[in-house]
Amino acid sequence: MNCIGKSPAVRAFLYRFVAMLSANVVIYTLTFIAFHRFQLRGMVAYLLAPLPALPIVGVLGVFALYLKEEQDDFQRSIMIQSILWSTGLLLAATNVWGFLEKFIDAPRIEMLFVFPLFCVFWVMVAPLVQRRYR
Amino acid sequence: MEHHTGSPAKFKFEDRFLFIIVPLFVLLGILDIWGFHYHHLHPTGALAYMCAFLYSMPMIAFIVVLGLYLAEETDDFMRALWVQSILWGIGATLAIANFCGASARFGLDPHLGISSIQFVFLLVMIFTMVVIKLRYR
């Protein structure tokens, strides 16, 4: 994948990103099993339910670490621009969809899909931003 | 008396905010009160789609105006300040969305819809901007 570069910071970013997503899958599966097997309720349920979100918060930390560790100002600038574009697209998309839910009873999108949507936008936008500087 | 000077990009940002976004908010506020609360209109079909897109306009306009400001701003410090605020804003928003989403998936409903994303983002962004500005005083 040429578009993401090969600096040590990028490699560290990719390893951490994959590790966090894998952790997400494992924790989600374990939480799912716990909820279905033990029919959790009350305080325990409130403590366990948000657990699968922790690795996603970790992913955000991975982005922050990359921005801190990247020595190449150009690469950092590309990452920041990609995040800014993705943020704009995510806010616009969720805003439009929110009003579609209100006015035409469009299917409700779960909050859990907000982060994957952001990632989709980021994956789409990053190569385009990189291509601008070729 | 303290005098604040701004860059041309900041003036443009303020002008666009005042003359595009504020009138849009006012117009939609009037439409909301007059149409949906006073006359209890229930648009359907293409009109409903149009209403949905019309109501999204202020936020989309804000995103575009902010993007233009970031592209035009020549003061690196000011740009960095906005960029940091946006990054914290989106980070916190995604974290909160995930916590709410995960809680909802397991039967705990935190009563946050997808349309609340932008409010969370704006709140965190403004809060971060104030904190960063205080840090650099």
Image: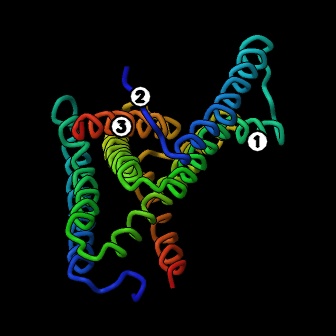
Q: Nearer the viewer, residue B95 or A64?
A: A64
Residue that sits furthest to the right in the current view:
B46
User: Could you give the CA–CA distance between mark 3 and mark 2, rounded to whole angstroms?
Assistant: 27 Å
The answer to whether residue A54 is visible is yes
Label 1 vs label 3, nearer the camera: 3
| Coordinates of residue B134 in the picture (x, y in percent) | 25, 34
Residue B102 visible in the shown view:
no
Residue furthest to the top in view is B38
Residue B6 at x, y percent in the picture: 47, 40
What's the chain of the residue with tag 2?
Answer: B
Which residue sits at x=33%, y=70%? A76
Q: Do circles 3 and 2 both sit on a common chain? A: yes
- Which residue is at a point 71% across and 14% down the rendered structure image? B37
Q: Nearer the viewer, residue A2 or A78?
A: A78
Does dot 2 land on a helix, a strand or a loop? loop
| Residue corresponding to mark 1 | B49
**Residue type of the residue flagged with mark 1:** Tyr
Report the residue marked by disc 2: B3
Query: Seen in the image, is B14 located left or right of residue B135?
Result: right
* Quarter assignment of residue B129: top left
Provide residue B32's location: percent of width, then percent of height. 71, 21
Question: Circle 3 sits on which residue?
Answer: B124
Is label 1 in a helix, a strand or a loop? Answer: helix
Q: Quadrant of residue A65?
A: bottom left
Q: Tell me if label 1 and label 3 are in contact, CB under 8 Å.
A: no
Task: Please report, as a chain letter, where disc 1 is located.
Answer: B
* Chain containing mark 3: B
Say if labels 1 and 3 share a chain. Answer: yes
